[in-house]
Image (cartoon, rainbow, N blue to C red):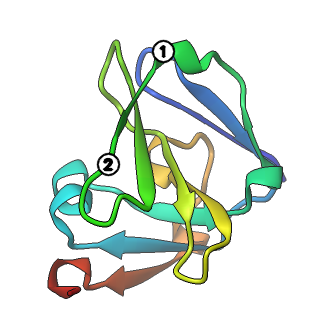
Amino acid sequence: MTVRGSCHCGRVAYRLEDAPTEAMECNCSICRRKGYQLAFSSPDKFTLETSRDDIAVYTFGSHTIRHQFCKTCGCAPFGEGTTPDGRAMVAINLRCAEGVDMSGVKIQQFDGANMA
């Protein structure tokens, strides 16, 4: 099942080829403030359907995740980066996804606030 998501104003929109069954809720400084529920996938299953010209990028800490957000409305529908073992990944914010039944998504808590 294909999942679609977007920022609030629609200037940043994506399509993900597989519906997520698991997500991560992290307590690090940015995830806690943004309220992220992140589902991870490989870049080959992710399609950005709008222009990257409407996206701003923020990185911090180890700079391994590029937090993408809309220049117009500020919503952060996805991020891109690398996994701890160096593979490329995309993280979609399920709070920006359409039609995802969250009762069927297993949420794993992650203690990012206490990582070295």
- Secondary structure under tag 1 reads helix
The foreground one among 27 and 90 is 90
Residue 110 spot, x, y in % from top left: 33, 83
Under mark 2, the amino acid is Thr
Residue at 26% over, 60% down: 31
Residue 86 spot, x, y in % from top left: 61, 75
Q: Please indicate whether residue 9 sits to the left or right of residue 13 in the image.
A: left
The foreground one among 107 and 61 is 61
Residue at 58% over, 21% down: 52
Identify the mark at residue 54; answer none if there is no mark: 1
Contact? badges 1 and 2 (CB < 8 Å):
no
- Secondary structure under tag 2 reads loop
Residue 33 spot, x, y in % from top left: 16, 53
Location of mark 2 (residue): 59
For label 2, the crowd category at 10 Å Cα-Cα, with few meaning under 14, some 14 to 19 and many 20 or more, is some
Residue 69 image-quadrant placement: top left
